[in-house]
Amino acid sequence: MMSDSISIAVVGSGYVGLVAAVCFAEMGHTVICVDNDERKVAALQGGDTLIHENHLPELLNRYRNGRVRFTTDLAVATRECAAIFIAVGTPQSETGDADLSYVEAVASEIARSIDGYKVIVEKSTVPVYTNEWIRRVVERNGVSRDMFDVVSNPEFLREGSAVGDFLHPDRIVVGADSERAGKVLQSVYAPLTDGSYYARTGAITGVCDATAPPPLLLTSTKSAEIIKHASNAFLALKISFINAVSNLCEAADANVEQVAEGIGLDSRIGPRFLRPGIGYGGSCFPKDVAAFRSVAEQMGVDFSLLTEVEKINVQQKKRFLNKVRSALWTLRGKRLAVLGLAFKGETDDIRESPAIDLVQMFLTEGCSIVAFDPAAMDRAKDELPPSPAMRYAADAYTAASEADALLILTDWKEFAELDLGKLNEAMRYPIVIDGRNLYDPQTMQEHGFTYLSVGRPSATPVREAVAV
Ligand code: UGA
């Protein structure tokens, strides 16, 4: 089965925009990706993805300057394309609301170039009613109602597995108030929903296949907007919930991993997003929980549950700091090895990273840090400039050398596979405080470590236990 190729413009070449652009090309469409940053456009034309993401370099190289063109010219892209996806940033404003000025600017510019029926698709994460505002902005610029529709098509990809998530989604949500616009979006996603993409040789493999393609859910625009915010808020809630349970496990000397497995096996709860740690971070959850709470407030709805979710998330970092204090007694002058600066593993993104916040807290306490992250060190240096108290190492063992304790702050896969003998030898004191539960306490104990993690009983080396 061959689906029709559609001409698509994607405005914004950040995580969502760039991934959407190359994935639409991979699905067989022709794409113009627009960004107003000339240097970014030049880099992308030259094959530099600018972000660390699986599959992205290969797809960019396959399609750049061919099925995907990069440009700063939104007017030309609007005229040439049938569907225009807006994927620009919606940063958090001082009040917690999403700042929609970039979305508005793009909508006005699109309006000035419309010369035939277009579907304007909102892919950035936005509060409910944004579609209506886009429609009003376009109309105010003199475009008649029959020349365009505005559709909400939220994106659910995770950084680190963005391409796989895009091409193998759990669901595709299309919020369209007109049948005509809904049909255009159904055609855009047809290669996924009819399974033809998965049957192709060389298709990126994942959870979907030709016999089990993803469902496309058609909703109203407002429902689609709420689905996006509610999904992220619910996932954040799940994380804060398990973090609160992990605190209870620590107090009761229980094991949160066993508890998470026990509750996650209930199919109504599910096992995912029940990993306790040092709190959620990243460019989405903190911003989206705040924005969703703010939208509810503006509409007179009490959603203080979300305030609790945020509160637990902040406390989780403080608890980790206190855990380190409890292991080291005093912090001033202590030399800490830090593994991980990114907000989670497999990404170089440090936005709202709990690891960065914690390093800042330890520096304020008078500790000196030697940090290592496989991908995020360059970006981290802007937030944590190198100094005698803040140094960077080329690998985990160098970071650990002569350290009073080693802290694991990001769940990079390679941090779960360290040579424990070598690590122990490198450190001044073999104390590991693991904010991501990457190791089995008994294994750490057998390798001579004092090991503290989240929501699990701590372990002390066998000989120390005997001496006591
Ligand atoms: C999140 C959502 O998972 C995506 O579905 C959504 O599309 C995206 O936001 C967005 O709105 O753009 P992302 O921020 O890339 O994706 O990262 P996640 O994998 O969701 O992790 C977020 C944070 O939660 C990280 O700090 C991670 O370490 C933490 N986390 C995650 C936990 O502490 N425990 C868990 O069990 C899962």
Image: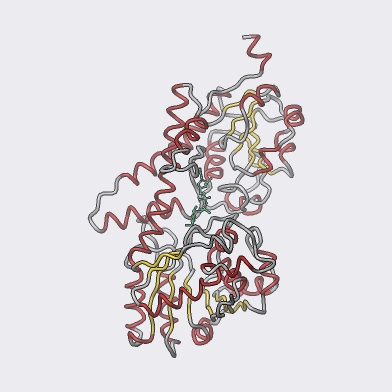
Q: Quadrant location of residue 42?
A: bottom right
Residue furthest out toward the top: 467
Which residue is rendered at x = 56% and y = 43% of the image?
Answer: 355
Q: Within the image, what quadrant is residue 312 found in?
A: top left
Against 314, residue 114 (above or below) is below
Q: Eyeballing the image, is 94 above or below 370? A: below
Q: How is the structure coloured here?
A: secondary structure
Q: Residue furthest front?
A: 211
- Quick one: quadrant of the N terminus? bottom right
Horizontal and vertical percent position of residue 214: 50, 62
Image position, residue 150 (x, y; %): 38, 76
Give the number of callouts: 0
Side of 147 relative to 10 (left or right) = left
Can you name the residue that lies furthest to the left here? 300
Position of 192 relative to 345 (above/below): below
Please state which of residues 412 and 380 is positioned toward the viewer in this rendering. Answer: 412
Q: Quadrant of the C terminus?
A: top right
Residue at 38%, 86% in the rendered image: 147
Q: Is 236 above or below relative to 61?
A: above
Q: Locate residue 288 relative to residue 275 in the image: left or right.
A: left
Task: Look at 68% across and 13% down and name the residue there.
Answer: 463
As rendered, which of 118 and 345 lies closer to the eye?
118
Image location of residue 173, percent across then percent down: 43, 64
Q: Whole-percent x and y of residue 22? A: 61, 70
Work out whether residue 225 or residue 339 is closer to the camera in this orientation and state it: 225
Residue 335 left/right relative to 276: right
